[in-house]
């Protein structure tokens, strides 16, 4: 059943949604089960799977291993078409609206269609907007695009709104994995005020305080990867 987006829309504004991001390139299968036990016992509501530099087939293997371990929705957040895998619940069909690289605006999407056709994935069109996070991030290198300045609220608001008007169902404000600074709170607020679709925020969030501040500013769903990868006691720290 295609229900992931509907579920996010229903819960947005009522519950604080949290996705744990698993990068198939960094997660070792032998520790997956004990990692997912912690995810299952945490406040996480979703699992995202994806990365900027992942060898072919690794994502499929990870998703297959993950599926029996959790009842949380598994959502592909692919850095490349080779990460499109069977067995996940949904895929964020990302268009990198902050950049002007045609491959990431439409090219990769066309390549993706034949792979998506072979799956039962719920496809969720998502406007993906990269914001300066204090260092050059993997997504910036891979996509060869320039993030939008942290100070340019208006450009980010207009970019997000353009995504909504083009029919995107979600907007994702991304500071980049391991960013020094997360997306500015003021920027989240401005974008949230303009949008009538759910807002995802991620990149560089490493503390409970930063997480709560992102929700207060207007994030409907927050994505955290690096903080869990580096220190699994972060799951405990997030407990309310
Ligand atoms: C990256 O937004 C996600 O695409 C999560 O970022 O790894 O910094 O938590 P972190």
Image (spheres, helix red, strand yellow):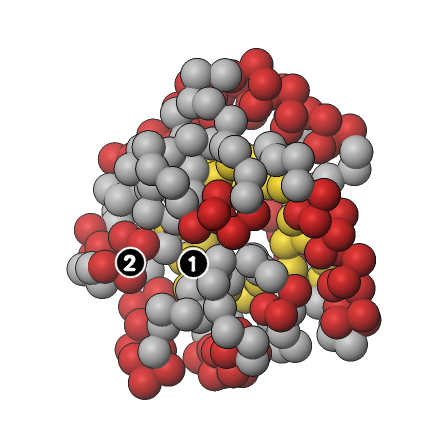
Please indicate, yes or no, whether residue 17 appears anywhere in the rendered image: no
Looking at the rendered structure, the number of numbered marks drawn on it comes to: 2
In the rendered image, residue 110, in percent from the top left (x then y), is placed at 80, 58
Q: Please tell me in which quadrant of the rendered image residue 133 appears.
A: top left
Q: Please tell me in which quadrant of the rendered image residue 171 appears.
A: top right
The one of 239 and 196 positioned closer to us in this rendering: 196
Secondary-structure class at tag 2: helix
The CB of the residue at mark 2 lies under 8 Å from ligand 1: yes
**C-alpha distance separating marks 1 and 2:** 9 Å
Residue under label 1, please give it: 21
Residue under label 2, please give it: 228
Please indicate, yes or no, whether residue 136 appears anywhere in the rendered image: yes
Relative to residue 51, is residue 37 depicted above or below?
Answer: below
Q: Residues within 10 Å of mark 1 (few under 14, many from 20)?
A: many
The CB of the residue at mark 1 lies under 8 Å from ligand 1: yes
The one of 115 and 68 positioned closer to us in this rendering: 115
Secondary-structure class at tag 1: strand
The one of 226 and 207 positioned closer to us in this rendering: 226
Query: In the displayed structure, does residue 193 sit left or right of residue 207?
Result: right
In the rendered image, residue 94, in percent from the top left (x then y), is placed at 65, 49
Residue drawn 51% across and 27% down?
148
* Quadrant showing the N terminus: bottom right
- Is label 1 in contact with label 2 (beta carbons under 8 Å)? yes
């Amino acid at each position: 059943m295609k229900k992931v987006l509907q579920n996010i829309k229903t819960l947005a504004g009522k519950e604080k949604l949290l996705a744990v991001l698993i990068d198939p390139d960094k997660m070792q299968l032998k520790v997956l089960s004990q990692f997912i036990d912690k995810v299952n016992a945490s406040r996480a509501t979703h699992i995202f799977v994806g990365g900027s530099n992942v060898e072919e087939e690794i994502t499929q293997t990870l998703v297959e291993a993950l599926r029996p371990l959790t009842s949380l929705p598994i959502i592909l957040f692919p850095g490349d078409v080779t990460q499109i895998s069977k067995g996940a619940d949904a895929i964020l069909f990302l268009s990198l609206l902050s950049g002007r690289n045609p491959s990431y605006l439409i090219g990769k999407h066309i390549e993706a269609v034949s792979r998506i056709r072979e799956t039962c994935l719920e496809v969720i069109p998502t406007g993906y907007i990269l914001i300066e996070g204090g260092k050059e991030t993997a997504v910036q290198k891979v996509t060869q695009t320039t993030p939008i300045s942290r100070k340019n609220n208006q450009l980010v608001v207009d970019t997000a709104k353009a995504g909504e008007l083009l029919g995107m169902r979600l907007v994702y404000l991304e500071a980049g994995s391991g960013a020094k600074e997360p997306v500015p709170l003021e920027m989240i607020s401005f974008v949230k005020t303009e949008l009538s679709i759910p807002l995802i925020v991620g990149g560089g969030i490493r503390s409970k305080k930063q997480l709560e501040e992102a929700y207060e500013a207007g994030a409907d769903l927050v994505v955290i990867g690096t903080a869990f990868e580096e220190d699994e006691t972060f799951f405990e720290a997030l407990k309310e």
